[in-house]
Amino acid sequence: MIRGTVTDDRIPVIELFVDGKRWRTVVDTGFNGYLELPELLRRAVKAQFIGHLESALAAGQTIVEENFIVEFPFDGETLEIEATFAPGDEILIGTSLLWRHRLEIDFVKRFVQIDRSVST
């Protein structure tokens, strides 16, 4: 289970431990990719270039980014997943990373919880 908070700006955040450091991580339900990572983590996650990715943004904008396979620690596992890199010092996780999880965001109580789903 991963727990976090909702900021004063109404942003759901958790903290993840990557490369010996805690990183502020934004849970972006409008991002259907896996990860956007700070450039500072490129070496630590053993990024391997796999090609270019076209991403659709708000207001009909599109951008082309370099896409990588990375080794990323999440919920007790090291996953091999796709990521892009950006300047800054926070991680952005998208809905593809959460495909095996249940996400609860309570804006009133300012609470975020991510649980691994159990198939029945």
Image (cartoon, rainbow, N blue to C red):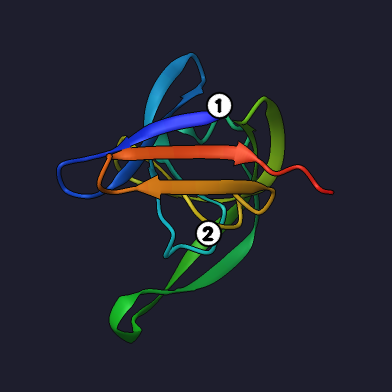
Determine the residue positioned at 63% across, 63% down: 51
Determine the residue positioned at 42% across, 65% down: 30
Residue 13, position as x, y percentages in the image: 35, 39
In this rendering, position of residue 76 left or right of residue 105: right
Determine the residue positioned at 59% across, 47% down: 102
**Quarter in which the N terminus is drawn:** top right
Amino acid type of the residue tagged 1 in the rendering? Ala
Residue 83, position as x, y percentages in the image: 56, 50
- The first of marks 2 and 1 along the sequence is 1
Residue 88, position as x, y percentages in the image: 29, 40
Read off the residue under disc 2. Answer: 66
Furthest residue in direction left, as rendered: 8
Amino acid type of the residue tagged 2 in the rendering? Glu
Determine the residue positioned at 47% across, 64% down: 65
| 21 w.r.t. 67: above or below | above
Which one is nearer the viewer's eye here, 20 or 27? 27
Element type at marker 2? Answer: strand
Read off the residue under disc 1. Answer: 44
| 27 w.r.t. 1: above or below | below
Mark 2 crowdedness (10 Å alpha carbons): few <14, some 14-19, many ≥20: few
Quadrant in the picture for residue 70? top right
